[in-house]
Amino acid sequence: AQSVTQLGSHVSVSEGALVLLRCNYSSSVPPYLFWYVQYPNQGLQLLLKYTTGATLVKGINGFEAEFKKSETSFHLTKPSAHMSDAAEYFCAVSGGYNKLIFGAGTRLAVHP
Amino acid sequence: EPEVTQTPSHQVTQMGQEVILRCVPISNHLYFYWYRQILGQKVEFLVSFYNNEISEKSEIFDDQFSVERPDGSNFTLKIRSTKLEDSAMYFCASSEYGMGNYGYTFGSGTRLTVV
């Protein structure tokens, strides 16, 4: 069975600092991995995804993530945080053909 | 950019009442899903739907839940007799080929409050 662990329910960074949100997965088959962002009172927006091929994937808003099979990780990074990045971020793994398994989420706070 | 539309955005209902949450998936998508997120908790899979039938459902999706595609554009989630613990944000999603390669497009959600 697939599962996702997001380390750190809350992360706080200064504006302009590096953002690193951690995600580890468990999967018995080659995983498809996703990061979604949820702004307050809004739905889930796809940031980026890894399916096959290049292990470093770039997404919207300057975010990127690297699939590391040996570490079963898919951490999300952004070189320089912006105030507008404050949101909740969810890592997810494909749980089979028909569903996503989500992590518990990481709330990112960005302070001046 | 095509969107998944959910209505209403917020619904308050009394315990024991039936509610229907509505979704309009992206027009050329063939796979439809419902997820829910209880306040402060993770997003949980409820059900997937393809070719006019349920293809997978979770343990949460018990007999009080049902889904339907009543016409060519709408996809609904019915909760027959609501309980307090059904209070959550319900997300509809759709995908063109099944989520494996493409992920889903999610709607903005319906916040259901059961009182």
Image (cartoon, coloured by chain):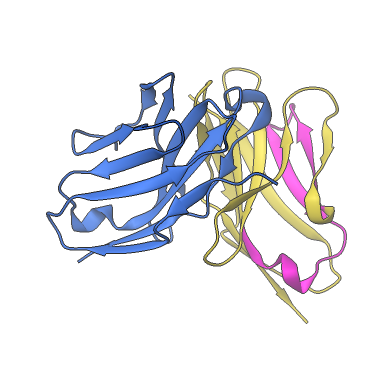
In the displayed structure image, the side of residue B115 where residue B3 appears, left or right: right
Q: Residue at x 70, y 53 (%)?
A: A21
Q: In the current view of this chain or complex, which residue is farthest to the bottom?
A: A112
Q: Could you tell whether A99 is left or right of B1 in the image?
A: left
Query: Residue A39 occupies which quadrant of the picture?
Result: bottom right
Magenta span has A81? yes
The residue most toward the left is B16
Q: Check the image and report above or below for B74 versus A79.
A: above
Q: How many marks?
A: 0
In this view, the residue in front, A39 or B29, is: B29
Query: Which image quarter: residue B13?
Result: bottom left
Residue A7 in the image: above or below residue A32: below
Tell me residue B31's x, y (percent).
Answer: 51, 27
Q: Residue at x 59, y 48 (%)?
A: A6
In the image, which residues are magenta?
Answer: A63-88
Based on the picture, tell me whether residue B83 belongs to the magenta stretch: no
Residue A47, position as x, y percentages in the image: 71, 47
In this view, the residue in front, A86 or A68, is A86
Q: Which chain is yellow?
A: A
State which quarter of the image contains the C terminus of chain B: bottom left
Q: Residue A101 or B112: which is nearer the viewer?
A: B112
Image spot of residue B84 (x, y percent): 20, 58
Tell me which residue sits at (66%, 38%) in the image.
Answer: A34
| Direction front: furthest residue | B71
Chain letter for the part of the structure drawn in blue: B
Question: Residue B41: where, in percent of width, then height?
Answer: 43, 55
Left or right: A102 as drawn, with respect to A47: left
Residue depicted at 53% across the width and 25% down the height: B30
Looking at the image, which is closer to me, A111 or B111?
B111
